Image (cartoon, coloured by chain):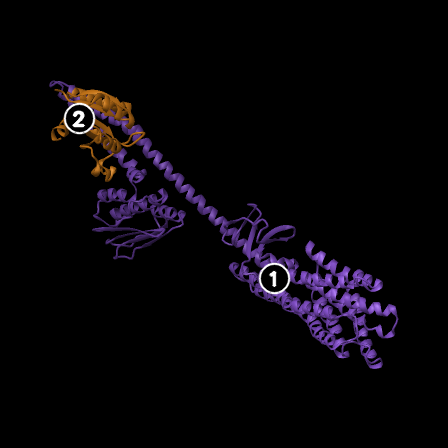
């Protein structure tokens, strides 16, 4: 409210001063150094552009400074009254005007000095324009010193602009561009004016400089406004963002929409998962927020709870309020995307835990096989050998005892064979010790149906879980063929294609296998999927059965 | 002269049974070892004509012990044995430097003598 009144007051003051300048140009000819229309246009362009900038970007001081610069410009219009006071008002207004232009160039587009160097440049400009002017003009000495200092300061402003341009990233340069193109022209004109301002009577050379100065001065507010409107392009983008997000985009499109609105293609979104107290990306993968450095982070909250963090180009920090506004506009879409990310994270967790369960199961199977081998089998072997020894020591009269011993030996042998088959089914030793290809060769030799091993992976060992999955896939398939398929042969082809193990097992049997049913097949599905792989079973009646699996094995 | 033999197996019960069986069949069991490293040391010290070598040992496997023995100056006849079947041992059995393989339940003096005669 107060701000609006102040704005209205300044607008009225600016308009009145312009009208007054036109008035004196008519009633007091030659009172202005510039043609009246040029003079008024310069002042009004500052006031008008300042008003516009102020209305569009109220939080940015640039508009206020521009408006005041225009009003100060008209402060030169009282010199015709004569007298020392009005002469000094005219002189002070001229130097203050230059200082204010320098001020705007230094702090554009944020409207505030943001570093020590900027504060020093702005303060020096005002000190030189006020104290420097008064000392030089009231005492009549040091005029050359003030001019020299002004030139140094002007060069300082140019250096500062060049430095900022070089350090700026794409969004920052877009805002700076109009200033960078007019800024040096302004400084050159100011330098030319200073150099020609010998204090003597108007010369042709001085008039030329003044006219050029006038053209450039009129361009300043336009350049400033253009720069501000360029950052305002973001604001239009905010509108587009709201429309785009209202159409309930896919979670993956939210990032793209925000990146477009903020003009930063490198924008990343980190979603906060409150239960796990960590950030993840859209795919649920853990994400660490950068700590300072080349990327800025803006944490978005809703009802005091963290929702997500935007990781973006720090030049957008010039407009932190806008980043926050874009984030707020995207809140619903971001919440939706966070659910998606949360789901992905949970899926990844479930998959990892399933893989761990399968792995733990395999480890347990290996241990069982080893225990059977080291324990019961060895004891039975001892009995077997003892029985053989006993038989050798029975003399010829003990035929009945010998028969008993033979019978016991056969029983033990049968038990041993059963134990071996059991151990092999639990986890074949050859798979642990030699790998997939030898284990499959052994499996093929034992199979009741002829097996063609068309292609086998090389000698390089694969991850144990992948080898186990491929082996049990083949073993289950062969068992099913023996039980149901009435096949005359089975073909097994295993190829390592980059980082995927492709397993293809087909038979020439009657087909019609229930691809979904059977605990063995369900277990195989679990095994393969736990490894992030896929398993497909085709079994049209009369056309054999084909089992196709792909397992990542990086 | 009765052939001398070293029994290498990490199961004491098997070593005991094998020793009794082979001694009954006329072999002289000169020593026993329970792992690959001590097997190599015992062969050097005892110079047996024959080594009955278990495949699955706690340190190195029997195939590696057989290969190491094949490089020694005293090279006994090595017979591998296991409670697993030959098919379960895969291709390593086809490549081994050992002279033969006997399943543990097939162990007898006669079977060993046959392998010794064939060598």
Asked whether, in this view, residue A415 is left or right of residue A241, the answer is: left
Q: Quadrant of the N terminus of chain A?
A: bottom right
Chain appearing in purple on the rendered image: A
The quadrant holding residue A462 is top left
Looking at the image, which is closer to me, A440 or A163?
A: A163
Q: Does the image show residue A131?
A: yes
Tell me how far mark 2 sits from mark 1, CA to CA. 93 Å
Q: Residues within 10 Å of mark 1 (few under 14, many from 20)?
A: some
- What residue is rendered at 58% in x and 53% in y? A308
> Is disc 1 on the same chain as disc 2?
no
**In this orientation, which residue lies closer to the viewer: A166 or A545?**
A166
Is residue A109 in sight in this rendering? no
The part of the image, by quadrant, that contains residue A199 is: bottom right
In which chain is the residue bearing label 2? Answer: B
Label placed on residue B108: 2
Q: Is residue B62 above or below residue A328?
A: above
Name the residue: 20% across, 29% down: B78
Whole-percent x, y for residue A460 in the image: 31, 45
As rendered, which of A283 and A368 lies closer to the eye?
A283
Where does label 1 land, which residue? A165
Residue at point 76%, 79% (across, down): A35
Residue A263, given in percent of the width and then of the height, sits at 57, 63
């Amino acid at each position: 409210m107060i701000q609006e009144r102040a704005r209205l007051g300044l607008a009225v003051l600016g308009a009145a001063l312009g009208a007054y300048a036109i008035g004196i140009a008519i009633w007091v000819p030659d009172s202005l150094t510039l043609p009246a229309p040029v003079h008024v246009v310069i002042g009004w362009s500052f006031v008008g552009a300042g008003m516009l900038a102020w209305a569009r970007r109220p939080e940015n001081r640039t508009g206020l400074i521009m408006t005041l610069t225009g009003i100060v410009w008209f402060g030169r219009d009282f010199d015709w009254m004569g007298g020392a006071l009005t002469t000094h008002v005219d002189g002070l207004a001229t130097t203050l005007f230059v200082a204010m232009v320098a001020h705007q160039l230094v702090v554009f587009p944020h409207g505030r000095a943001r570093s020590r160097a900027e504060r020093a440049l702005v303060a020096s400009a005002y000190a030189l324009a006020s104290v420097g002017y008064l000392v030089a003009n009231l005492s009549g000495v040091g005029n050359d010193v003030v001019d020299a200092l002004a030139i140094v300061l002007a060069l300082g402003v140019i250096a500062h602009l060049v430095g900022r341009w070089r350090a700026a990233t794409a969004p920052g340069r877009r805002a700076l561009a109009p200033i960078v193109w007019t800024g040096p022209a302004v400084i050159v004109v100011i330098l030319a004016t200073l150099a020609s301002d010998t204090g003597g009577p108007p010369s042709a050379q001085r008039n030329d400089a003044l006219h050029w100065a006038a053209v450039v001065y009129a361009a300043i507010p336009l350049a400033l406004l253009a720069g501000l409107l360029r950052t305002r392009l973001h604001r239009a983008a905010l509108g587009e963002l709201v429309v785009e997000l209202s159409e309930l985009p896919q979670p993956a499109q939210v990032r793209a929409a925000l990146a477009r609105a903020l003009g930063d293609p490198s924008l990343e979104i980190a979603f906060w998962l409150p239960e796990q107290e960590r950030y993840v990306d859209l795919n649920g993968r853990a994400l660490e927020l950068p700590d300072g450095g080349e990327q800025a982070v803006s944490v978005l909250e809703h009802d005091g709870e963290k929702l997500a963090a935007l990781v973006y180009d720090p030049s957008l920090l010039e407009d932190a309020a806008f980043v926050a506004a874009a984030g707020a506009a995207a809140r619903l879409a971001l919440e939706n995307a966070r659910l998606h990310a949360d789901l992905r994270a949970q899926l990844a967790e479930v998959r990892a835990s399933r893989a761990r369960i399968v792995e733990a199961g395999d480890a347990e199977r290996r241990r069982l096989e080893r225990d059977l081998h080291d324990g019961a089998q060895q004891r039975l072997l001892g009995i077997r050998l003892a029985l053989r020894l006993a038989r050798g020591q029975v003399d010829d009269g003990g035929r009945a005892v010998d028969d008993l011993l033979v019978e016991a030996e056969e029983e033990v042998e049968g038990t041993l064979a059963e134990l071996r088959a059991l151990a092999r089914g639990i986890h074949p030793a050859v798979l642990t010790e030699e790998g997939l290809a030898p284990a499959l060769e052994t499996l093929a030799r034992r199979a009741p149906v002829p097996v063609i091993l068309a292609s086998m992976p090389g000698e390089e060992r694969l991850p144990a879980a992948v080898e186990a999955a491929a082996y049990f896939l083949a073993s289950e398939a062969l068992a099913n063929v023996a039980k149901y398929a009435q096949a005359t042969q089975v073909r097994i082809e295993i190829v390592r294609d980059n980082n995927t193990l492709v397993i293809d097992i087909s038979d020439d049997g009657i087909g019609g296998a229930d691809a979904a049913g059977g605990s063995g097949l369900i277990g195989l599905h679990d095994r393969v999927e736990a490894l992030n792989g896929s398993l497909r079973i085709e079994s049209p009646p009369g056309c054999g059965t084909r089992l196709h699996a792909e397992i990542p094995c990086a | 002269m009765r052939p001398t033999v070293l029994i290498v197996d990490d199961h004491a019960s098997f070593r005991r049974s094998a020793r009794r069986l082979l001694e009954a069949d006329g072999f002289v069991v000169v020593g026993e070892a329970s792992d690959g490293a001590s097997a190599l040391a015992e062969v050097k010290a005892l110079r047996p004509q024959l080594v009955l070598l278990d495949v699955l040992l706690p340190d190195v496997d029997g195939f590696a012990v057989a290969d190491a023995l094949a490089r020694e100056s005293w090279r006994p006849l090595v017979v591998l044995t296991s409670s697993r079947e030959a098919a379960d041992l895969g291709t390593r059995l086809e490549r081994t430097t050992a002279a033969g393989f006997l399943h543990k339940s097939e162990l007898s003096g006669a079977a060993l003598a046959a392998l010794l005669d064939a060598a």
